[in-house]
Amino acid sequence: MLAVVVGVIVALAAGLRDGGAGFLDYALIGAGSLALSAHRAAPRAVLAVTTACLLGEVVYAGASSVAAIPVVAAVHTAARAGHRGVAAGAAAVFLAGFAVAGEVGGAAGGVAAGEGSDDIVQRTLLLAGWFLCALVTGLADKNWQAYLRQTEQRALEAERTREEAALRRAGEERLRIARELHDSLTHSISIVKLQAGVAVHLARKRGEEIPPALLAIQEASGEAMRELRSTLTVLRTDEPTGSPALLVERARAAGLAVELAVCGRERALAGDLERTAYRIVQEGLTNVARHAGGSAKVTVGLDYGERVLGVRVEDDGVADAGRPPVEGTGLTGMRERVASLGGTLLAGPRVEGGFLVRAELPLEGGALLSGTARGTAGGTADEASLGVPMGAALSGGAGKAAERGGSPAEVRVAADVGRPGEGT
């Protein structure tokens, strides 16, 4: 568009001069001006074509300052691309041809030698100033673009360094917490479990009746040990130990009626997305086993879209839409993970009964859906309000319990998302 505008201005100036303009004039002006449209791809070729065409126009029709506009633009773009010497040479050639054409045209028109020479010198010097400005602004623009690229590269490097440092600090903190938990809790619970086991063994050996409280202590301490091991494993590594399909198989082995539905083209995901999808399915199945009732049917859905990944865990259990859930650590963890990836989250009882968690995660960093995740701790999650798949990630122990081939009771102990009437 800029090339067309420049060509139109020069063509109008040529048409309004004395004697008008012919076909050759318009052809030279059009070719030299429209060549500017390719200045990004071939700045030196554009400079050569523009200078040749407009110099031919000046020599053919006489010295016209307006005819220098396309050449000035070509000199600027060539200097911006880093071809300073070529741009300066083209400007010098055009100025020399302009001066010669002005002298010849003035002599042919019968203008006095002194008056014609002074006018051509002034116009040539004026054009020289234009070309000098074009060279300087081209070089300044080139340096400014280089500065912007360098600044952007430094910002990206600094951001990557900050992210790496944050991940490293987070990993170190998880390891420190794992060590503290191991040192402060695991040993004490091990002693409690050992003492309870010895007491039960002695009571049986003596033929005495075992107190129910002692059996409860033995069972609770063993369960606490298993959960602590699962927690320490999660703290030491946040990597998934399988896939959502494997979680579904483990849940089936533990006694849950689970179906897996996969939509779209299944493909490999980035580490954060894969980890998030795994955790949302893991936590969802944990909470179904704990709160939905033994006869509940569960559907796990994975929707591989072009721009988003959808994860859904839905059951037809005992959750009531009139009794919103009390938000617990698990739901908070889901919201935080989803928010960190720029996704959306909705979770709550369904109108027709049961509980639904749906999450949506952008597959690309630029495809953020809402900027902040949405979570409902007291609303109803129905099909109308949950019209999109969503994603979240959780830290639960259900996968660990099912991995050991435990019973549904073992699967239920790891949940930390509150169901109606329960705050965990």
Image: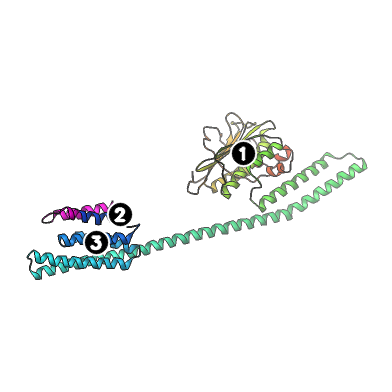
Instruction: Report if residue 372 lies within the magenta region.
Output: no
Circle 3 Cα neighbour tier, 10 Å, few/some/many (<14 / 14–19 / ≥20)? some
Q: CA distance from mark 2 to mark 1?
A: 64 Å
> Who's the residue at 79% across and 50% down the image?
190
- Looking at this view, name the residue that lies furthest to the bottom: 114
Which mark, residue 326?
1
Which residue has dot 2 on it?
37
Which residue has dot 3 on it?
52
Upstream in the sequence, badge 3 or badge 2?
2
Horizontal relation, residue 282 to residue 26: left or right: right
Upstream in the sequence, badge 3 or badge 1?
3
Note whether residue 95 is visible.
Answer: yes
Residue 24, by quadrant, is: bottom left
User: What amino acid is found at the position of numbered circle 2 in the picture?
Assistant: Ser
> Who's the residue at 30% across and 66% down the image?
86
> Who's the residue at 12% across and 64% down the image?
105
**SS majority, magenta:** helix
Q: CA distance from mark 3 to mark 2?
A: 16 Å
Relative depth, front residue between 145 and 212: 145
What element does badge 3 sit on?
A: helix
- In which quadrant of the rendered image does the C terminus lie? top right
User: What amino acid is found at the position of numbered circle 1 in the picture?
Assistant: Val
Which mark, residue 149?
none
Q: CA distance from mark 3 to mark 1?
A: 79 Å
Magenta highlight range? 1-26
Note whether residue 424 is visible.
Answer: no
User: What amino acid is found at the position of numbered circle 3 in the picture?
Assistant: Ala
Relative depth, front residue between 367 and 63: 63
